[in-house]
Each structure stands twice: as structure tokens, then as C-alpha cells.
Amino acid sequence: MDPRKFSEAVLQDLLAADAVLPEQFWTSENGTTHLSGERALMWAVFADGIQTYRRNAHATSAENQVQFLEAEHWLLSCDWGWPFSFVNLCEAFGFDPAGVRRALLMWKKNRRQAMRRQRFRPVILAA
């Protein structure tokens, strides 16, 4: 499989899934999972950062808004010096950092628009 298509498929699954496990993506030729502890930790940090961003994108509580702002700062940062920075983790897994950012920002925009379009109609009780 073309590595670019594989990376795109993995990224799409990550952005759409509620729970993501490394075993879903990296298997060896014989079908067994082969991840180093460091790589598994890197994946856990990457997935948690994206899930925190998505879970708190439209938060109303102060605590959740702080979590969102921290995740957004991590996502938008271009820090190449920290091993668990967003850009370094994207590079480690073969993702384009700008593409992941675009996808998440588009998701946030579309989600906000969908939330605005919701109309709550009162239940009409028949007499």
C-alpha cells in the first residue's frame, strides 16, 4: 500500500474515532503488533492531544476551556526541540502537520456551524 494513502487512512480514522489503539494501525508482516515502548508512548500522547482538542473544542466550563486551550497551543506550536511536540509526533508517524491542523480546524468549524443550526422546538402537548 502506498505510504501516503496509508497515512491518510490512519489520520482519517484518528479524527473520526472515539477510541484509538495503536494495535489498529501498526502490525508486522505476520499480523502481530510490534511497537517499541517509546513509539507506543508517542502514539498515546499524539492521540490524547487530538482527543482532548476535540472533546473540549466547544466546552463551556472553565476547566474544559483551559484543557482545550492547552491542546490547541500544543497543536499549533512549531516546537521542533521537544520530542513530544505536535510537529515531531506527526513526523514520527508520517503525517503532514499542516494537513492534520487543517483537518482539525475544519472539523471544529463544521462542528460549530452544526451546533448553531440546531433548533430546539418545544414539545406541543395535545389537549
Image (cartoon, rainbow, N blue to C red):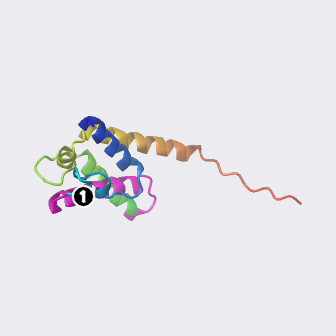
Q: Nearer the viewer, residue 84 or 33?
A: 33
Indicate whether residue 58 is drawn in magenta.
yes
Q: Residue at x 25, y 58 (%)?
A: 32
Q: Amino acid at mark 1?
A: Thr
Provide residue 14's location: percent of width, then percent of height. Answer: 35, 49
On screen, residue 68 versus residue 125, left or right, reads: left
- In the image, the segment drawn in magenta is 35-63
Q: Nearer the viewer, residue 42 or 67?
A: 42
- Disc tally is 1
- Asked if residue 122 can be seen in this view, the reply is yes
Q: Nearer the viewer, residue 28 or 26?
A: 28
- Asked if residue 56 can be seen in this view, the reply is no
Indicate whether residue 48 is drawn in magenta.
yes
What secondary structure characterizes most of the magenta part? Answer: helix
- The quadrant of the rendering that contains the N terminus is top left
Residue that lies at the very extreme toward the right in this rendered image: 127
Residue 96 lies in quadrant: top left
Residue 51 lies in quadrant: bottom left
Residue that lies at the very extreme toward the front in this rendered image: 30
Provide residue 86's location: percent of width, then percent of height. Answer: 22, 49
On screen, residue 28 versus residue 106, left or right, reads: left
Q: Residue at x 30, y 41 (%)?
A: 100
Q: Residue at x 15, y 60 (%)?
A: 38
